[in-house]
Structure formats: structure tokens, C-alpha cells
Image (spheres, helix red, strand yellow):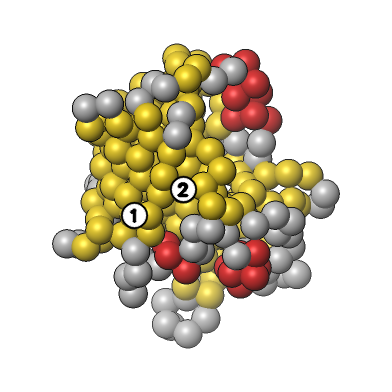
Amino acid sequence: MKISDVKKLAFAMPLTSPSYPKSEFRFINREFFVITYETDIEALRLVVPEPLEVTDPIVKFEFIRMPDSSGFGDYTESGQVIPIKFKGKSGSYVHAMYLDDVSPIVAGREIWGFPKKYATPSLSIDVDTLLGKLRYNSVDVAIGTMGYKYTNLDQEKLLKAILKEPNYLLKIIPNCNGKDIDICQLNRYFVKDVTLKGAWTGPASLELFNHALAPVSSLPVKRVISGSHFIADLTLGFADTVYDYLKG
């Protein structure tokens, strides 16, 4: 293969069989179970990078089913998202994500900088209860529950929040010398083309358990504030870099 061919073909690894396609990623019937809870604000400040600012001791723990994802297939994801402010405007910082599909793990890390690790999350209906679980190898590290379709949510208000709020990621790519880093960026993305198909709330609970390699409990649950459950079609937008740590 000639150098010109490498330049022409290079998009993602491996060169001759990339782990994901070169396209936008559309999700159909993406199902969210989000538990908002109060935690220790000092614990948040230890994990949220400047120039993002933590203003409230709030975390959103998410369980997400993605049964129809272009380029990625069928998978489930779980993790923690932290409300922040950047230059005085509200947004969310994606702190940790765990999922069961290699393709979106690789694409998420390489393109946007999603903090993804392989694990086994699940989202299901247990009789009258919406049940989210996160298992790292053989150990349960998170269990969330909510009354199933207990009360309708205001869909118009939720849709505006989904479309308006930016999301931030810390993308890190190490140098091949094993010591330095080639990329260290704060990236911002939005979701778009959202069709909301249903939204509900209800009584919710969340338990987090200690694990050395899935430290979700380092942001402990002091009080559950709310639970929400919604289903939507959406497109994951590509990102732009808002701060480069290597350039300052």
C-alpha cells in the first residue's frame, strides 16, 4: 500500500477494517432511565476538570438501552453525568460510561472522547418496576429502580432541555512513547434531530457499590432527587474543541 493510499483510507483503526463507520450515528427507540441525586460537592470538584465549574452537588446516573443504533447495533450503556457551567452557561460533563459493545466504546473514545469502559449494564421491566443494573465483570456496582410509567412528564420541556444543553468530554490520546500525551482536549457536543416518543417520572431509588475499577460510589448518594424515563429517536452530533490543555 502506497503512502498516498494510507492517507486516503486512514479514518480509524484498524486501517483496512475500521471498528466503526464514517458516518453520523442515529439512534432509534433509545430508552433512558435517569436518576438525579445529591452527592458530596467536594467529591465532584475532585473529578470535574477546569475550566468547567461545579456549582451544585448533583449527579445524574443513567441507564440507556440502544436497540437500534446505526453503525453500533444493539447495546446498553450506564454511567454518571455531572451538571456544570462553562463560561457561565449550563451544561453536562460526562464523567464515566460503561457499556457492552466494543464498536461504540472505540468510536466514543477515539472521535469524541467519551470515557467508556467495557462492562455489563442492563435496563428492563421487573413487573411494575423499571430496573437498571450495572455489573462490572461479576460484581454489581449500581442498581436503580423507578415505578414504571408512574406519571407523565412534560415532554415539551424535556425536549427543549435535551436539544439546548451542551455536553462536555475530556478527550485524551497518549503518545506512542508511553509517557507523553498527543491530545488532551475539552470537547463539546449536542444531540440533534430528536423525536420524543414518551416520558415519565415516578418514585426512584439508587444504590451504588464499591469497586476498584468501576468507582461509581466515589460520588455517593446522599439523596435521590428524581427519576425520569423517556424514549426518543436522536442523532449524536459530532463535537468541537472548546479548550486545548496542551496549548492552554
User: Nearest the camera: 148 or 192?
Assistant: 148
Circle 1 sits on which residue? 142
Task: Quarter of the image for the C terminus: give it.
Answer: bottom right
Residue lying at the far left of the rendered structure: 138
Farthest residue, direction right? 88
- The answer to whether residue 224 is left or right of residue 125 is right
In the rendering, at what x and y percent does residue 91 appear? 68, 44
Height in image: 243 above or below 179?
A: above
The residue lying at 48 percent from left, 52 percent from top is 80
In percent of width and height, residue 213 lies at 33, 71
Mark 2 in CB contact with mark 1 (< 8 angstroms): yes
Q: Which mark is residue 155?
A: none
Instruction: Identify the amino acid type marked 2.
Output: Phe
| Residue type for callout 1 | Ala
Rendered residue at 35%/26% (across/down):
148
Measuring 36% from the left and 45% from the top, which residue is drawn there?
A: 144
Tell me the residue that label 2 is attached to: 61
The quarter of the picture where residue 13 lies is bottom left
Crowding near the residue tagged with mark 1, few <14, some 14–19, many ≥20 C-alpha atoms within 10 Å: many
Nearer to us in this view, 85 or 248: 85
Q: Give the left or right position of residue 51, taking residue 159 as reference.
A: right
Q: Secondary structure at mark 2?
A: strand
Residue 66 place in picture, x, y as percent: 33, 32
3D distance between C-alphas at marks 2 and 1: 9 Å
Q: Earlier in the sequence, mark 2 or mark 1?
A: 2
Q: Residues within 10 Å of mark 2 (few under 14, many from 20)?
A: many
Badge 1 marks a residue whose secondary structure is strand
Residue 89 in the figure: left or right of residue 160: right
Residue at the (33%, 74%) spot, across then down: 212
